[in-house]
Image: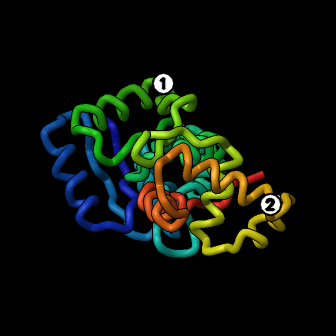
Amino acid sequence: MIRILLVDDQKILLDGLVKLFEPYGDIEVVGILPFSETAEVMTGRLQPDVILMDICMEGKTSGIDCTRKIKQHFPKKKVIIMTGFQDMHFVELAQKAGADSFIYKESSAEEFVECIRKTVSGAHLFPDLKKRATFGFYNATLTKREIEILHLVCQNMSYQEIADVLHLTKRTVGFHISNMLSKTGHKSIVGLAVEAAEKGYASMPEQEE
């Protein structure tokens, strides 16, 4: 029997996952947590085999921070990060935090169960890091620098503020933004920023050193 602890601040998702696993005789949900702050304590108390952890939760502790703490104190426990955002940056953060696998919330029941079973067996399942989120009417792929700038645009920073943060000139920032608009087909940076926010860039966790 694979014992599962679910951690997510969306009750509707928690309820849905509980029902999703009911037909599978080898999986048992031993706990559901709407607060990330208690995840480490409940891992020690409930002794699950796998923790399904949402990456973005309200409160002081993100899923990334929780994963890092759980793997530090319970290295043999398997942690699977889940998210609804198609953002490869999250995959990188999850790997650095020590997560064992990564899955998107829109995955099917079969995909969730397969991910859990394989992870318990020692596999590490992550989306292809070579694939990047695309933007705009032309499904354009942005460079790492462009993604950095776009993230800061989503934080309502001015061109000069972005230049200061990234140690660039204001002119260079303007060049990158002009290039992004040309590649994506967006007429204004506002439209591109809205799309980026919808894909998770506005609430992206800070990258660890």
Please state the horizontal and vertical placement of residue 101, each as a whole percent of the image.
Answer: 48, 36
Give the SS element for disc 2. Answer: helix
Residue where numbered disc 1 is placed: 123
- The disc at residue 138 is none
- CA separation, marks 2 and 1? 46 Å
Q: Is residue 41 visible?
A: no
Q: Whole-percent x and y of residue 28?
A: 26, 44
Colour logic:
rainbow
Q: Position of residue 114 (x, y in %)?
A: 31, 29
Residue 176 in the image: state x and y as whole percent.
69, 52
Type of residue at label 1? Ala
Q: Nearer the viewer, residue 204 or 103?
A: 204
First in sequence: mark 2 or mark 1?
1
Q: Is residue 14 left or right of residue 141?
A: left
Which quarter shows the N terminus? top left
Q: Residue furthest left?
A: 23
Neighbourhood count class around disc 1 (C-alpha, 10 Å): few under 14, some 14–19, many 20 upward: few
From where the camera sits, is residue 150 visible? yes
Query: In the rendering, which numbered label is found on residue 171?
Result: 2
